[in-house]
Image: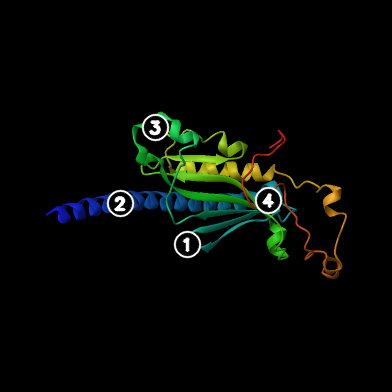
Amino acid sequence: MEENRSHKDLFKTLIQKSSLKLDIYDNTLQAFKLFKQAIERLDASYKASLSELAPQREITFENKYRGDFEIEVKFGGDILLFLMHTNIFEFSRDHEVRRTSYIRQDQNRSYSGVINIYNFLADSFKYNRINDLGYLIGRVFVNKDNHYFIEGKRELGFLYNDFGTNEMTEDAARKIVEAAMLYTINFDLLTPPYDEVKLVTVNDMMNTIDAISLRTAKRMGFQFRQDTDNKK
C-alpha cells in the first residue's frame, strides 16, 4: 500500500508537469504560427506597394520556411530568423520576472516556451561567409496563460516587457514582427576597429573577396548582449 501511494504521487507529479509543458508548447507553437501569418501578410502588402513606393528599385522582401520551427525573412540587406525552441524553460530565480506579482501568484507561470529572433546580413548567406556573425535581437517567452514577455533590444524589450498583461494575439504577433524589422533596418553595419582587421593571413587573401574569412557583423556577435552605446 505504501508503495502504491508513492507511485501515485510520482505519477501525479509526472502528469501535472508534463501537461503544463504540453500546454505551453501548444501556446508557443500557436504564437510561432501567428508570426508566420504576420510575415506572409507583410510580404503580400510589400509586393502590392513596391511599384508605387520604389518603381525603379528591386529591393528584396521575401520569406521562406527552413523547417517546422524556423522562418527566414529577407528584406533589403538583412535577414531575420525566427527560431522556435521545442523545449520548455523556467526563468531562473534571479530573473526580474520572478519578482513580479504575476509570477508570485502562480509559479507555474514562470515556465515558458521560447522563440528566438536573430539578425544576419543577407550577404553572409548569399556568399556562404560561414565566419560571419549574427545577432540575437530578441527572445519571446510564451507561458501557459498565453501571455508573453520579450527580452531584447530597444523596440522589442522596452515595449513588450509586461508579462502579466501581454497576451499573444494576432495583433501582438504583427507588432512584434514589425518592431523586429524596424530595429533591424535601423541597426547599421559599423566599420570594425582598425586593429582588429589590420592583419590578414595568406589563406584569407587566397580566397575571393566575398568568401574571405574575416568576420562581418553589425556589432557583437551571435548572442544577446547589451550594447555599450546609447544608439541601439
- Of the residues under marks 2 and 1, which one precedes in the sequence? 2
- What secondary structure is marked by label 1? loop
Front residue (pair 74, 59): 74
Residue 160 percent coordinates (x, y) = 51, 36
Does residue 178 lie above or below 85 as drawn?
A: above
Residue pictured at 41% horizontal, 33% vertical: 164
- In the rendered image, the quadrant that contains the N terminus is bottom left
Report the residue marked by disc 1. Answer: 68
The three-letter code of the residue at mark 3 reads: Tyr
| Residue 94 image offset from top left, x and y in percent | 49, 37
Res. 93 mark:
none
Q: Which residue is mark 4?
A: 221
**Mark sitting earlier along the chain (4/3):** 3
Residue drawn where x is 28% and y is 53% of the image: 14
The image's mark for residue 102 is 3
- Cβ–Cβ under 8 Å for marks 3 and 2: no
Q: Position of residue 228 (x, y in %)?
A: 71, 37
* Mark pair 2, 1: CA separation: 22 Å
Q: Image check: 178 left or right of 186? A: left
Which residue was labeled with disc 2? 19
